[in-house]
Amino acid sequence: AKNSETMKKIYSETSEKLNKTFGEYIFKFMNISSEEDPYYLWNTTNMYYIGDTFIADYTDGRDMELIRNTSINMEDFYINSLNLSSLETYFGYFGNPLEITAYLQMSPVFRSIFNYMDMRINLDKKGEGDKIISKSPRFVMVAGHDTTLAANDLFLKEEFGVEYEHAVYCSSQIYELWKNEKNGKYFIKYLVNQKLKEEFDYEEFKRKVSHKIYNENEIIEICDGIKNKNKKNDKIFQILFY
């Protein structure tokens, strides 16, 4: 995705803007000059790491005196850092528009979600909804990177029209399984940063998602196909099943 002409153009335009807007400030607090390394800020990876670190420090409320002393507009730099982070996490990994990689990344995640929820539904139907066994927990937490959250956002937008919110520092996405006591139907509450974003009928959601995600053999076949097109590299894709 990063090597596509579309992404190269976007990265180039972003780098140019950031250089013109923040280049002098960044070099100042880094205590180097543009003459020493004139192309440093044209490297989007460098800019991404600077912005990523800034987002974490800014959100944690650190004073960052070195940066403030450059007279930089901290709020403006924060917004631009978020924009760069959004470019990297949402489109740098998955392409613009949405590429198959988002589906590959979300396939094992959704299989895991449905597996846990089905076990809870089975216990509920047996009248043992409060029973907790090792294979049927009431709560599961997975820690991941912003790219995982971005893949989930892009998947939901593509398949269900859910508008994504940029996964800012310390974001969370929650899938909760609920039961409507009046009609006995199960439904999902989807929360972003603890705020309700969408509700889905469980069976309908599961049916639609299941038609779109890949099983393990399909993922292996797809990745082998990609690998054959990139014979210069060995491991070009890794996915964790959990």
Image (cartoon, grey):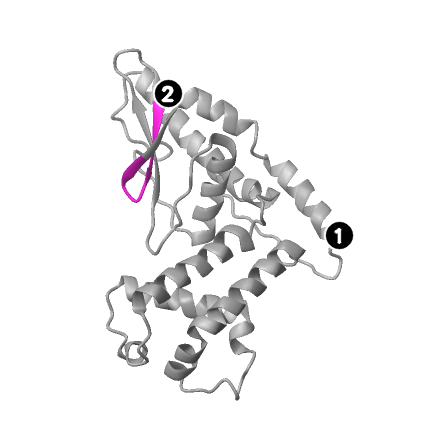
- The label on residue 229 is 1
* Rendered location of residue 35, percent (x, y): 52, 88
Amino acid type, label 1: Lys
Predominant secondary structure in magenta? strand
Q: What residue lies at 47% left-to-right and 87% top-to-bottom?
A: 33
Residue 51's image quarter? bottom left
Q: State the count of labels.
A: 2
In front of the other: 157 or 193:
157
Q: Is residue 95 above or below residue 41?
A: above
- Badge 1 crowding class, 10 Å Cα cut-off, few under 14, some 14 to 19, many 20 or more, is few
Residue linked to disc 2: 122
Alpha carbon distance from label 2 to label 1: 44 Å
Query: Is 90 inside the magenta-drawn segment?
Result: no
* Rendered location of residue 121, percent (x, y): 36, 22
Query: Is 193 inside the magenta-drawn segment?
Result: yes
- Badge 2 crowding class, 10 Å Cα cut-off, few under 14, some 14 to 19, many 20 or more, is few
With 33 as the anchor, is 95 left or right in this view?
right
Amino acid type, label 2: Asn
Q: Is residue 183 above or below residue 25?
A: above
Q: Which residues are magenta?
A: 187-196
With 202 as the anchor, is 8 left or right in this view?
right
Are circles 2 and 1 on residues that touch, CB within 8 Å? Answer: no
Q: What residue lies at 28% left-to-right and 31% top-to-bottom?
A: 132
Q: Can residue 242 be seen by looking at this rendering?
A: no
In front of the other: 83 or 198:
83
Q: Secondary structure at mark 2?
A: helix
With 32 as the anchor, is 192 left or right in this view?
left
